Image: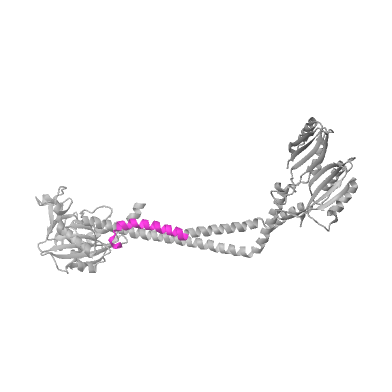
Amino acid sequence: MLKKITYRKKFKLLWVMAGLLLIFCWRFSIAKTIDEYRNYNQNQNAATGNEFYNEQNLRSKSRMLDEVLEKFMLDTLDNSKNLVEVVSNLCEQNNVRLKEYKPNPVSEADSLRLLTRSVRIEGKFTDCLRLIYQLETRSSIGRVSSVLFKSSENADGSKTILNCTFYIQNIIP
Amino acid sequence: MLRFIEQKILQIRKAAGIEIVFLPGEKFHINATVVSLKKNKVVQEHSFIGLANLNELAKKLDQKIPVSVIFNGKGVLVKKLAGPTNNVSVQSIIPGANPADFYFESFSNNSVSIASMARKETVDKILEEATRTGFKTISVSFGVAMLNNIIPILELNNETFETDSLAVTLNDEKIISDVKTKEEINVEKFQPGEIKIADQYIKPSALLSFAAGVFCLTDDLKFNPPVTTALIVVQRSEWRYEKLFKAFGLGVLAFLLLILLINFFIYDNIFQKNQALQFSQLENAEQLSKLNDLNTEIGRKERFLQQSGWKNLSRTSYFADRVGSMTPASVLLTVLNINPIRTNAETEEPGRLFKKDTIFINGVCGEPADLNKFINNLKLIPDFRSISLKNYEYRNEKETGSFLIEAITKD
């Protein structure tokens, strides 16, 4: 059949075939090289990325965060973090009375387990306030997350008393 | 540039000249010469004298090369006209003849004009037969016109030489001064004497076929030859496109091969690098896993600090102090709830137990104006973003009103 086709037509056909061959070359050869190159770039980026947050950087960042979180960590062996003991002492210093200590169920935030404990004290507003301030600034018993001042009258209605309930949160290691 | 490339591609480097001499009784006497271009010199490669038909020639001649055919002998009229003239035509030679029936060719020099003509029917018949036999005929000529291609290199001067059917005379200026048709056509294969052309010797019988071959080597296929027939035009076009097809085909294949080869080397290079990279990544997988875990852990802690507000110091005592200091004597606070516990409905995220930016203030106040004053006082505290009175209820029996204020703190 090819013999019947004139060379003029064959010459035109040549460019069509050349185009088709070029497409085949692209599809089955060059495209694969480009894919491999992209793959290589991705791997390289991944490798570079891992190197970027290399061990040293990550560890120093982690250390820094741990320092921030350290004062919120629950540590039952550390007396300075013993809530009842710390609060008792502060109550004595500030002329307030410890009325209630109550641990609440453990909750989770961002997969960190949090222990929330509530403490109720009774005393004058300024005394209670001073105690709270000392807990916030001078102790490392945990985070003072909430404070509730509530005044009420005693049973016979002769005296107004002020209850202060504060919530201390700790991260359970 | 393209024209130059095309010219290089179309340059004929080997060709054959064929002289077909008509003999009485529809017989032929065929002489052929194969010439080639070697180092810009025309070289006679083979010469075949006195063949009886085209089939015999086809067995001896490489049919891939182009051929130029000269017709002579009985049936081809070669006529000398005195002096140079431009008005030579079929009818000036044979009055009353139909020009459409003849192929006609003429040339002039300072001395004479020579016209040659032959019947189209006869010539076309032979050309068709030549095509069928497989020859690629790209030009056709009659008489001695082709001799003009080789006269400058012909080492003859003021002499007469004979081809098989013609006797040609050159004058002192080395131009054709006379042409005579021989009474008897020479059909002898072996002839004494040779004619020197440049540094090679050509038999007189092969002279015209040699000249035709030389014409082929110098022919430009883009233009029509002196004598054009429908078949010649087609054959020339076919020859031209065959050459272009082969050259460009080869070029395209070479180009694609080059692309594939380069691509292969690039691919191989990238592949090797990739393999090495993947291998090193596998080796460090454990270390990477630890780093990833550490990174996740850091992200988790950062997010917690950001969302819980624990990165800043707790300021509950500060807010309590501020609210207490701003409270007028006529207002009695009953509840001050800083960062109150969220209700179940308010807990969008598990673990966030307290509203970290809210303060609820409950109290009693006899005069609404005093309450308003208290609110205005609170608004003066720069750490509060907004203060809103949520509820106020006056009780006649106690002559006092209870209220609820919500303060939103800044981060």
Residue B376, image x and y in percent? 77, 32
Residue B291, image x and y in percent? 67, 59
Q: Is residue B296 within the magenta segment?
A: no
Residue A13 visible here: yes
Give the vertical position of B45 relative to A56 (above or below).
below
Residue A73, image x and y in percent? 78, 54
Residue B326 visible here: no
Q: Residue furthest top?
A: B369
Q: Residue at x 34, y 60 (%)?
A: B246
Q: Nearer the viewer, residue B71 or A92?
A: A92
Give the quadrant of residue B196.
Answer: bottom left
Residue B134, image x and y in percent? 24, 64
Q: Which residues are magenta?
A: A1-29
* Left or right: B316, with B127 as reference point: right
* Left or right: A44, with B7 as reference point: right
Q: Residue at x 75, y 39 (%)?
A: B407
Q: Residue at x 84, y 43 (%)?
A: A129
Q: Is residue A27 within the magenta segment?
A: yes
Q: Nearer the viewer, residue B404 or B163?
A: B404
Q: Main secondary structure of the magenta part?
A: helix
Q: Nearer the viewer, residue B139 or B126?
A: B126
